[in-house]
Amino acid sequence: MHIPFENIIQLNEMDQVKLMNRIDTKFWFHIEKLPEIFEMVKDDYYILEIKEQRKLTYSTVYFDTPEDSMYVAHHNGKLNRYKVRLRTYVDSGINFLEVKKKNNKGRTIKSRIESDDNPLLFQESHKEFVNLNCPYDCDDLSPVLRNIFQRITLVNTNLNERCTIDLNLKFETEAEFLALNNLAIVEIKSDGFRSNSPLKKALHRAGVKKSGFSKYCIGRVLTNPLLKGNSFKPRIREIEKTVFFEN
């Protein structure tokens, strides 16, 4: 797939648009719409490029309690909910342990620390970080889901908005593997005070409506039929109509 952006932003310049406290707006659709959308916004965004690569590979391991407390909180629509995850930037080999909070104002607040070569073994500094930033005891957490995907990252030329386009999403557990082929997931991240997003306008023109998509929750439902998933079943049916799954 051709990615037509000419303006490039370097990784060290991304600090200007970290947006660790932000509003997220998500969209998902069949990948066939992407070329049209890219053409509409190619002059409005920088694209992140590392070592001449524009599609970068990410891997995420999610943690939860034995009672799946974080998943259940999301399923039940609880305010002030959390995710604890290990994010690996595969191309650079960098790991971050992250806590994401969605507060009762709809804002996403992300905290993170760099991890080490054995990121699944929590060290004391990791435990202190998790216990400081979320209400769950780190000693009660264990890995429950891994995903891997490729990401294209765009930054508005006004440096007030960051957008990610995730492709080739795959889910893995100890017992299951599932790939969501031909799905594009777009997330527009902003400070919440500006709504003049060229990408959001382009998606609207392409007939794409905003729709929530939690990679953690969708992955848990698809790989664990024993989990309560009533809240996500309509979303799963929509996804099934849009893409095909590969086991």
Image (cartoon, rainbow, N blue to C red):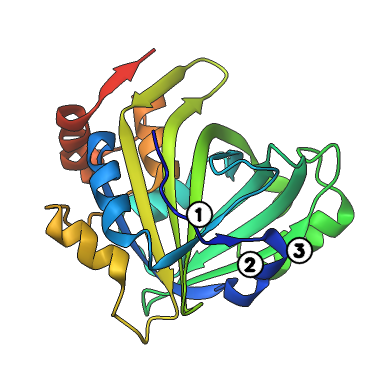
The answer to whether residue 224 is visible is no
Query: Are the residues at dot 2 and dot 1 in contact (C-beta closer than 8 Å)?
Result: yes
Q: Secondary structure at mark 2?
A: helix
Residue 151 appears at what percent x and percent y? Answer: 50, 44
Which sits earlier in the primary sequence, circle 2 or circle 1?
A: 2
Residue type at mark 3?
Phe
Residue 162 appears at what percent x and percent y? Answer: 47, 66
Residue 182 appears at what percent x and percent y? Answer: 31, 29
Check residue 129 in the rendering and tell me which mark sits there, or answer none.
Answer: 3
Residue underneath mark 1: 153
Residue type at mark 2?
Met
Mark 1 nearby-residue class (10 Å; few <14, some 14–19, many ≥20): many
> Going by the image, does 59 lie left or right of 101?
right
Residue displayed at 17% across by 52% down: 208
> Going by the image, does 4 lie left or right of 18?
left
- Between the residue at mark 3 and the residue at mark 1, the CA separation in whole angstroms equals 27 Å
- Between the residue at mark 2 and the residue at mark 3, the CA separation in whole angstroms equals 24 Å
Task: Give the number of the mark in front: 2 or 3.
Answer: 2
Q: Quadrant of residue 210?
A: bottom left
Q: Secondary structure at mark 3?
A: helix
Residue in front for this viewpoint, 35 or 212: 35
Task: Give the number of the mark in front: 3 or 1.
Answer: 1
Residue 243 appears at what percent x and percent y? Answer: 24, 27
Residue underneath mark 2: 14
The quarter of the rendered structure image containing the N terminus is top left
Q: Secondary structure at mark 1?
A: strand
Residue displayed at 22% across by 34% down: 239
Residue in front for this viewpoint, 190 or 152: 152
Which sits earlier in the primary sequence, circle 3 or circle 1?
A: 3
Residue type at mark 1?
Thr
Q: Is residue 97 above or below residue 161?
A: above
Check residue 144 in the rendering and tell me which mark sits there, or answer none.
Answer: none
